[in-house]
Amino acid sequence: MKWWTSKVNDPTGPISGNSSFEETFQKSIILTNMESMVAWGRKNSIWPFNFGLSCCYVEMATSITSKYDSARFGAEVIRGSPREADMMIIAGTVFIKMAPVIKRLYEQMMAPRWVISMGSCANSGGMYDIYSVVQGVDKFMPVDVYVPGCPPRPDAFLEGILLLRDQVGNEKRPLNWVIGPQGIVKPQGPSMKDAKRTERMQMTEIRPIS
Amino acid sequence: MTDIVNIVKELFPGVMLTAQETKDDFPTLWIPVDQILRVLTLLKTGVDKPYKMLYDLTAIDEQGRIHREGQPESRFTIVYQLLSFERNTFLRLKVALTAIQPILPSITRLWPAANWYEREIYDLFGVTFQGHPNLRRILMPETWIGHPLQKCHPARATEMEPFTLPENKQAREQDSMQFKPEEWGLDKTIEDDELMFLNLGPQHPGTHGILRLVVQLDGENIVNVVPDIGFHHRGAEKMGERQSWHTYIPYTDRVEYLGGVMNNFPYVMAVEKLAGIDVPHRAKVIRIMLSELFRISSHLVWYGTFAQDLGMMTPVFLTFNDREKVLDIVAAICGARMHPNWFRIGGVAQDLPKGWEKGIQEFIDYFPNRVKEYDNLVMKNGIFKARTIGIGVYSTEEAIEWGITGPGLRATGLDWDFRKKQPYSGYEQFEFDIPTGENGDCYDRAKVRVEEMRQSLHIIEQCLHNMPEGPYKSDHPLTTPPIKERTLQDIETLINHFLNVTWGPVIPAGEAFCGVEATKGHNGYYLIADGNTSSYRTRIRTPSFAHMQFVPAISSGYTLPDLMAILGATDYVLSDIDR
């Protein structure tokens, strides 16, 4: 599908293309299958569950505010109830006292549902190898994307959302009974450590932040 | 030794009282266990300029402590820290417990605020308080076995069984969380009307974190509130017994996670007291400047979320944008946003970067108009006023009784700010006012915080114009990491540097408390060094713990939506309650 937008200050808007019959036809008709269409819709309207555990939650909330604006990626409709949400962000330390509650909230979410583990504590326990902390939320529930940092900057968290969007868009999730295997096929998540290694090795100075 | 020790000695002739020298020079007295209630009663009610506030109550597991010269034999030591406003001094009382089953009388009848502290000691140390109304676990789950702060309890999660959550365990844990009103002595009916118990949390947008409140309701009117805390217990105190003095600093950042370096402040100052380090003036002013930036940043988060709790959507977006501006300055100086881990024992991590003045000057020019705008948007808003004026009212006496510090205390009209009353790190050289309220309601608490942002900005401006020249770190041998340039001159300093960086500094044995006027109230670290590379006991006295305990007392009689206003105006974070 090919599409474009006009600039805000442009009174008429430049006409891209040549207004030919083929072009108009291309703009008006989408050829796709139902499954991809639904996946595209899901990808662009992930509703996060308003759930936070500790420090990371503040940065997660910051990513919704104007400077970072997670609405750009269709993920700003925060839901207070797990039943209305698609995505649970484990933003913070997973405490042993809290673990049964987290699991229950996850189970209350309706499928399809995804989990982002935000911050070192949720990823692995992080710096809290201590009696009251579970060493990573994946000890008792599945995780789709891990975002490193203590806490991750809001932009790092947004990158996590982008990665999840890619995964959601490419997920094979049959809409009906089909011949052959029935299950959901999730794409293998990329290793960002490997993907960014060359770029990071070439860095010689700290980039300015704003 | 001060006069209060002599007064106590005179009033209790024949009672064995041992005075102890500490590095913080607080009068410290050992009291026999059978006399503690009498002595405390007298200090609270029977002396001239009484000790009205139970500032802290904690314990020490003495098993394995080497340096206890001149102290009575003890297995568990209970430590009472009292504050007298008239005297402007702290007093520390200690009780030695030698029995294998340690028991001592509860002081909840004398100070209702002792309730949670005694439960905490019971939970973490296994000490029993006789006469406590409801002695049960407070931080750990009901199903927990053992008492984590005992020296024999494992510290690391990786020392214990790997965590699993099979279905039967999940069900058992959920069952143990079931609220049973009879366990709390709460009636299910009132004058033939059935009461409702509403469970709020641990996952609820209005609780600002993983806090659970069980609200006893008569219709929409609150009869009682039972806070259930401990969901955020990160074992920060136990962590101090394992990390070296230096590597514990990042953990302090996360104790009150909106306060950033403000949390490093009392910790490094307490270590400096133990080690006898004098901090250079430049480091002191850098510390003050960054702490005040974080006070503004923390208050901005509070401002936006408080307004949101009361139904306003706009302010939170505006205040978070301003918070970004503060955090940009913080990141430019420290390299990180929320947890800069920037203070060091004996100074700060690095000198200020070139051109640091520019960002701060821009912020000083920019911010006052914004605060004015927020006044118009929030403080003058009719609905906001209606939701906060006359809600959650308490008096100065009540606040002192319950250990309330910070803006919550000042909103009652008492101009008590530790930056002025017990100045630390050179605050006495700064010019600023202590904003106070009159009515002690939610609106006044908000008003005090808003004015505090202006005062903080005023302090930052003074830092900007009067930043002293000189080193940013002390040249004391225990400064960590030591000044690198010295290492290449002689072998002594090289060895010193090597040891301080690899093992960490060995802080001489002793005890010291240091507190600061933090964003939420008075935050203090009580450190016990046993001549080792890590602390023997780290006690973190956080303001939010006391403030949350006070919430039930100020909520009953109001309606459920008022509870949101009361919680918002209390301004707590969960890590500050549970540590």
Image: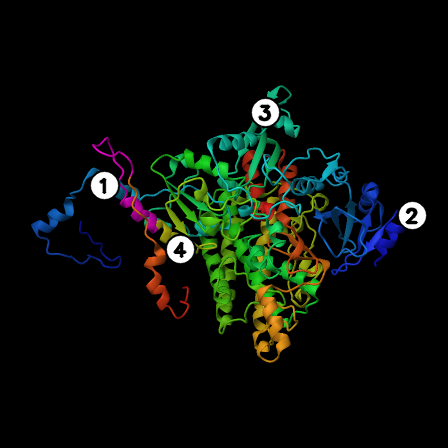
> For residue B188, which quarter of the picture?
top right
Which of the image's four quarters has the N terminus of chain B? bottom right
Q: Position of residue B450 (x, y in %)?
A: 57, 54
Q: How far apart are marks 4 and 1 (CA)?
A: 28 Å
- Mark 2 — on which chain does it sit? B
Q: Residue B13 carries which label?
A: 2
Q: Name the residue under label 4.
A: A156
Q: Separation of disc 2 and disc 4 at Cα? A: 66 Å
x then y, percent, for residue B233: 57, 45
Magenta stretch contains residue B346: no
Q: Give the range drawn in magenta.
A: A162-184
Name the one closer to the observer, A105 or B260.
A105
Neighbours of disc 3 within 10 Å: few (<14), some (14-19), many (20+): many
What is the C-alpha distance between the residues marked 3 and 4? 47 Å
Please give left or right for residue B535 compared with residue B22 in the image.
Answer: left
Look at label 2 and name its amino acid. Answer: Pro
Residue occupying image coordinates x 27% and y 38%: A173
Query: Marks 1/2: CA distance?
Result: 87 Å
Image disc number at residue B195: 3
